[in-house]
Amino acid sequence: MTDGEFRLAYVPGVTPGKWAGVWAERVREVPLRLLQMPAAEVVPLLRNGGVDAAFVRLPVDREALHVIPLYMETTVVVVPKDHAVAAVEEVQLADLADEDVLEPLDDVLTWDDRPGQPAFTRPESTAGAIELVASGAGVLLLPQSLARLHHRKDLTYRTVTDAPQSQIGLAWLEVVTTDLMEELIGIVRGRTPNSSRGRNPPQQPTRKKPPQQRSASKHRHQKRRRR
């Protein structure tokens, strides 16, 4: 943390807005600064102290890091709207056997055996691969969150049921598990304010009975004892 703010990096495709809203309600005295950056830059920046925590795509090098896996992402194939795949709700990898499949240099999926046929080129980025899909040069497999991020009106996507999946996790330095970090962990895991492991939740004031109510309660108690 620096200059009174908590710096949270996130890779493209992650949408931290909901968690940021909860942070603003619970930790009003410390602003949350969100920083989107390429996946390859997030962990080095975290190790260098440039941010306090980061949403990363797993796997990452976990040396000196705490990493909490959060959720899996659905894998989809992006195709032109007039492509045959667009006529069905979902496909399997075998359905793409005859397709030219683009593999950008920033591909976030891990493959044992890539489907389809290698495309004529490897674009430098996912954004470049999307442009090639729109030109009819091939199809692209990627997490659904990235397909939404790079949405175009002339393209669509369909779920690939048996493709590898990407996983999102929360990472921070092992030596810097602060109360604010615990607060963030609680937020992304859906803990209520009273169940947070970080900062002490505010104590609810004890409500005192009005004098008349206390007197009436005492009178009833004495009456029961006389019986």
Image (cartoon, helix red, strand yellow):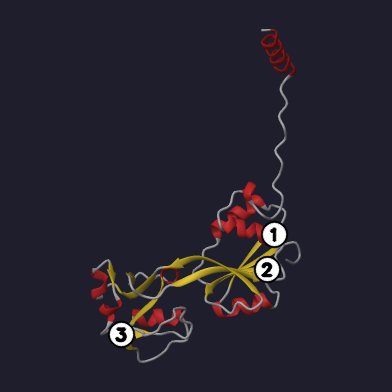
Please name the residue that numbered disc 1 is placed on: 180
Q: Residue 82: in sight, yes or no?
A: no
Q: Earlier in the sequence, mark 3 or mark 1?
A: 3
* Residue type (three-letter) at the residue carrying disc 1: Leu
Residue 29 rendering spot, x and y as whole percentages: 72, 53
* Residue type (three-letter) at the residue carrying disc 3: Gly
Q: Quadrant of residue 136?
A: bottom left
Outermost residue, bottom direction?
Answer: 120
Crowding around mark 2 (Cα neighbors within 10 Å: few <14, some 14 to 19, many 20+) is many
- Against 46, residue 103 (above or below) is below
Q: Is residue 152 left or right of residue 223?
A: left
Please name the residue that numbered disc 2 is placed on: 52
Q: Residue at x 47, y 78 (%)?
A: 108
The quarter in which the N terminus is drawn is bottom right
- What label does residue 116 carry, if any? 3
- Against 107, residue 17 (above or below) is above
Residue 85 rendering spot, x and y as whole percentages: 26, 73
Q: Are marks 3 and 2 in contact (CB under 8 Å)?
A: no
Q: Residue 16: in sight, yes or no?
A: yes
Q: Quadrant of residue 99?
A: bottom left
Q: Is residue 86 left or right of residue 41?
A: left
Crowding around mark 1 (Cα neighbors within 10 Å: few <14, some 14 to 19, many 20+) is some
Q: Are marks 1 and 2 in contact (CB under 8 Å)?
A: yes
- Against 179, residue 175 (above or below) is below
Crowding around mark 3 (Cα neighbors within 10 Å: few <14, some 14 to 19, many 20+) is some
- Against 7, residue 25 (above or below) is above
* Residue type (three-letter) at the residue carrying disc 2: Asp
Q: Quadrant of residue 121?
A: bottom left
In three-dimensional space, the C-alpha distance between marks 1 and 2, rounded to whole angstroms, equals 10 Å
- Disc 1 is placed on an element classified as helix
In three-dimensional space, the C-alpha distance between marks 3 and 1, rounded to whole angstroms, equals 46 Å
